[in-house]
Amino acid sequence: MSDFTKAKSVRFRGGGFAPKSHKGIGLVAFIVLITLAEIGTRYGYISALTLPRPSDVLATFQQLYETGLLWKHLLPSLSRLIVGAALGVTVGIGVGVLIGLFSYIRAGLVPLVAAIFPIPKIALLPLFIIWFGIDEGSKYALIAFGTFTPTVVATYGAVDNVDRTLIRMGQSFGLSWFSIVRKIVLPGAMPGILSGLRISLAIAIILLVAAEMLGAEYGIGAYILEAGSLYDLERLFAGVVILSVLGVIVSAVIGLIERVLLRWRT
Amino acid sequence: MDIRLQSVSHSYGETEVMRDITLDIPSGKIVCIVGPSGCGKSTLLRFIGGLEKPDQGDILQMGEPPRNCLNPLTYIFQDFALLPWRTVWGNISLVLEDHDIRGTRAKTIIQDVLTRTKLSDFAHALPKQLSGGMKQRVAIARALAVNPAVMLMDEPLSALDSQTRELLMDDLIALWTRTPFTAVYVTHNLAEAVRLGHSIVVLSRRPGQIREIVTIDKPLADRSYADADLEAQQKHLWDLMRDEARAADAELINV
């Protein structure tokens, strides 16, 4: 039986399907893409009407910074984003926790949330302008409303997923209802709430631009709209880059919060 | 404080899971409950601790719990039920916070229970850093912190490997020998039952009824691994249960 001449090593067939973190590769992808665009536009493979030259976009951006227009556009946008998203996320988490905890509230509100989730919130902007005025109010409301629904859905899902045995444990030690919610349900739901927040805040950025396109003097949305109507591709791209950077920053901030709050996770 | 179960019966819908169980749990003794799977042992334990209500019958507390007892009926769960976001220390302080025990008073209690469970060096570790046996020690420490009148142990060693189980059994015996506590210990493992039980209640398969109560007089401290007396007792228990266990195994689950 044990004939070594016929022995061969067992073929390895495990491996893969395990995400690993490779730092820097994301950056390399960006650099390669931008370099290709730069070479393409510089040597005429890509016409200036198809794609602006990355170095020109950078120059436009620098100009924007030096004239002080950058802050003039960015600051109102940021304040709209922060106020609107804070409102929507706070109310959303509150309502989501209530839905998760009380079956009557769940029965009443889940169909309602399902009904307002698919409405493109931007379609309601005229309504918001009538309700909250043409100024900042309607923009806050639009962003708040848009972040509210995904936050609610993520939050009550997360509360549903809290380990029931931990809640039984709390009850068996005679913890008060309020203690169980604060010390067991909320921390247990935190991973789900935070991953919902990533989606909600990306939606908030989209809605911010949409709201500013429809009626604002200053703001990144207004800046992009103006550049677009003039076919000024360099400025258009400069605006888009700002939005992308904003998205990356928001995602990084949530990553940081996750690392601090969810250190206990394996 | 003694516990008395008076003709407890229970059904889940059409399925009768428990019929007319009357049982006394005397203070200072460990009562083991064994039985084939699905005989309602864990349900019975949830009744005793007030986490579930039986359809019929009463669970009675005879006498008052000791004065310094924070939570008379305290569970130890099979899956430990530790909060993963709190350290060992935090998990124990959790059950004291609601009784307004903080600061130095809490510190004294926590340090005491950590010493008794040999966990003093791990006070600031998170549950994910601990082995299964360590996690269950933390759960035992947490239960000791509230100074329970009766410990309700739901298969506390079933999630552990057999070596760890032996070590923890020794620990439990040492804890009991130092300060005898009252416990209801549910298990499917007959070796655990004969090592830890002053009396062993054998339940029949569904609907669970008491078939026999076996008392073992040998003191806990004198019982050891692979003890001939205990082996004989264990064989007796197995003879009682074998056919029922086989029938329970072959049963379709439609609860």
Image (tube, grey):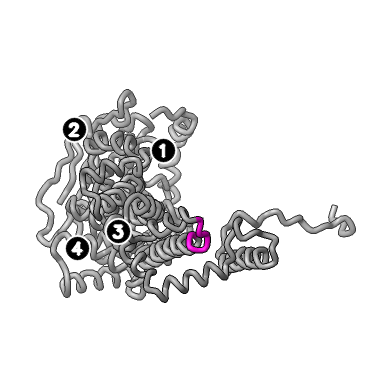
Given the image, on which type of amino acid does mark 1 rest? Ser
Query: Cα distance, mark 1 to mark 4?
Result: 35 Å
Given the image, on which type of amino acid does mark 3 rest? Arg
Nearer the N terminus, badge 1 or badge 4? 1
The residue under label 3 is A80
* Dot 3: chain letter: A
* Dot 4: chain letter: B
Are there few (<14), some (14-19), or many (20+) residues within 10 Å of tag 2? some
* Dot 1: chain letter: B
Nearer the N terminus, badge 1 or badge 2? 1
* SS at mark 1 in the image: loop
Magenta residues (range)? A231-236
Given the image, on which type of amino acid does mark 2 rest? Gly
Q: Out of B231 and B102, give the one closest to the viewer.
A: B102
Q: Are marks 3 and 4 on the same chain?
A: no
Given the image, on which type of amino acid does mark 4 rest? Leu
Nearer the N terminus, badge 4 or badge 2? 2
Question: From this viewpoint, is residue A227 visible?
Answer: yes
Single out the residue that lies furthest toward the right: A5
The residue under label 2 is B57
The residue under label 1 is B37
* SS at mark 4 in the image: helix
Image location (x, y in percent) of residue A74: 36, 65
Tell whether label 4 touches label 3 (CB within 8 Å): no
